[in-house]
Amino acid sequence: MSTFRYRVNTFIQYKDLIKELVSRDLKLKYRRSFLGYVWSVLNPLLIMIVMTVVFSAMFKRNIENYPVYLLCGRMLFEFMTNSTNGAMRSVTGNASLLKKTYIPKYIFTLAKVTSCLLDFIFSLGALLIVMVATGATFHWQILLTPLVIVQLYIFCCGVGFLLAQLHVFFRDIQYIYKAVTTAWMYLTPIFYPLEQLPDIVQLLIKAGNPMYYYVAQFRDMVLYGRLPGPRIFWGGWVFAFVMLFIGVWSFKKNKDKFILYI
């Protein structure tokens, strides 16, 4: 219990630093941009329009309200890739600061994922615009979407901690991860219906693709107006906390060696 209290006290002690790091990341992202934070809404809208034009001819007949279907999957996956890629460079990118003063190294990784979370929340405005424009029904289940976002945030923190410590020792991980996320995107039903895949592929995605769980839950609540099934809902939490455990364990195990390699 004393160890837990110490970690909580440490987090509280550095909460202002986390706020500053998150604010810095958001400001740097839109620095010298004329539209600024408006791009959080415009960017997913523009990507959705392009992808809808490209893929709607193939899948529109099989999918209800394809623009909303596409945007739900695309926004969640983009949050995951942006946050984990940022987290991967969070320790090495702050090497000069870590060499000058003592700061818990996890602070930088947590701040990166959190700044991407805020950017994702801003981008939800694009989803609301598309829902209104396409005449989508606003179901009460949409109020439960924060449960999915929290699951995904925990999952991204876990992946971020794992990647951050790997990147300290093995810089080529950034290129490997880029290939992994590309394959991951195509193995997640973002712009196509899962039912069009062979049965064995569907089974593998349902069993081992965490993003399938988060995207499926989000679409159930936003697009279909229903509660996710118990397997999908609890499976999302399991993936989130298992990944968090792996990430925190690996980060904690190697954090004392970081100073020798950054």
Image (cartoon, rainbow, N blue to C red):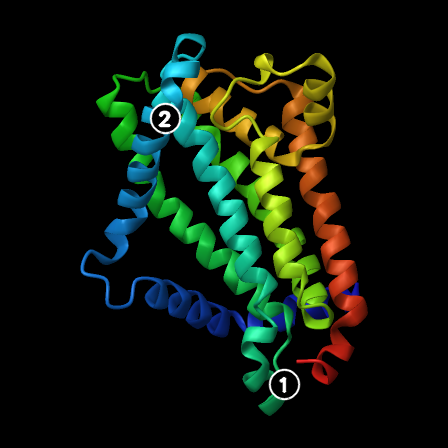
Nearer the observer, 103 or 116: 116
| Residue 175 rendering spot, x and y as whole percentages | 62, 57
The amino acid at mark 1 is: Tyr
x 78%, y 61%: residue: 250
| Residue 88 rendering spot, x and y as whole percentages | 60, 62
Nearer the observer, 186 or 136: 186
Q: Is residue 109 above or below residue 220?
A: below
Q: Is residue 132 left or right of residue 87?
A: left
Q: Marks 2/1: CA distance? A: 50 Å
Q: How many numbered circles are shown? A: 2
Q: Is residue 161 left or right of residue 133?
A: right
The amino acid at mark 2 is: Val
x 57%, y 42%: residue: 182
Q: Label 1, on which residue?
A: 102
Q: Is residue 205 above or below residue 15?
A: above
Q: Is residue 35 above or below residue 219?
A: below
Looking at the rendered structure, which numbered label has been put on residue 219? none
